Image (cartoon, rainbow, N blue to C red):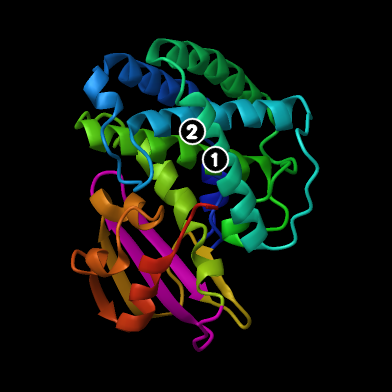
Amino acid sequence: MCLRCAFDMSANVKLGPILTAHLFSSLEKALIDLLRSLSPDEWEKQTLSPKWKVKDVAAHLLDTHLRRVTACRDGYAGEAISINSQTELAAFVNRLNQEGVRVYRRLSPELLISLMELASRQACLYFESLDPFATSRWAVSWAGERESANWFDTAREFTERWHHQQQIRVAVDKPGIVTPGFYYPVLDCFMRAAPHHYRTITREPGSLVRFDISGECGGSWYMHRNDKSWELLSSPRGKEVSVTAIPQEIAWRIFTRGIDPDIAQSQVAVSGEAELGLHILRMISIVA
């Protein structure tokens, strides 16, 4: 029996794992092909990230692969640091990101692409080597976890690779990765932040909040209120109190700070409790 079927055998169970390790090589090939196609002017196009142009995003993607392989595969720590809060983690990650971009954007596009090929091969092999249900080196902090399984951390990294590549594609108007095989796992991973994001909002036990992401890559996610907290389920249960419909074109931008929530709201439909449904527009499924 397949893993997904096993998790869907009974109704109203929590969502199962998102297995993405096998997808990295195809996504990375698409990235390298994209970078090879860029003209000198396109390397300097502005992206949705206000501080980063296309070359900055490419430099960041190279840097994060190198850091992942260094820290997780090789167990090498470049510096010792104590992190005691989400704020400290975000500041640390932001600093590393800025340093990496500053260094690697100095490279020629040709050399950057060559190094990306090397880093991508090693990172893909690393992710494929992991036991998806073993404990990961890094927890998925934006989902409120202090300890995560490898499958979740790997899926989180897949969302990083996807959404940064998508930033480049939007900037240079070269679509190609908004497909169900790539984008649905990204959305599914992003949505795992919902119970943590709603943790300060309470409703009667049995309340159900539904999130619909429209389009061929989207789906529906059901968040149920139990006696103490919210939980995501694979099918609806309880009394539906709010439904939020988000177009797939802006969903990834909402969860990665790529669009102002107030602007996004004009493209979103909510029925039932509006305040409850619109709270999802301020959910962030990235660290920094």
The answer to whether residue 124 is left or right of residue 237 is: right
The answer to whether residue 51 is left or right of residue 201 is: left
Please state the horizontal and vertical placement of residue 149, each as a whole percent of the image.
Answer: 68, 46
Please state the horizontal and vertical placement of residue 42, each as a whole percent of the image.
Answer: 24, 25
Residue sitting at 25 percent across and 37 percent down? 170
- Between residue 194 and residue 215, name the one nearer to us: 194
Please give the residue where the numbered disc 2 appears in the rendered image: 60
User: Does residue 1 appear in the picture of this structure?
Assistant: no
The magenta stretch spans which residues? 200-224
User: How many labels, in total?
Assistant: 2
Q: Is residue 221 magenta?
A: yes
* Quarter containing the N terminus: top right
Please state the horizontal and vertical placement of residue 184, each as a whole percent of the image.
Answer: 38, 43
Please give the residue where the numbered disc 1 appears in the rendered image: 97
Is mark 2 in CB contact (under 8 Å) with mark 1?
Answer: yes
Q: Quadrant of residue 205?
A: bottom right
Residue sitting at 74 percent across and 40 percent down? 134
Please, is residue 80 above or below residue 29 in the view? below
**Amino acid type indicated by mark 2:** His
Residue sitting at 72 percent across and 57 percent down? 146
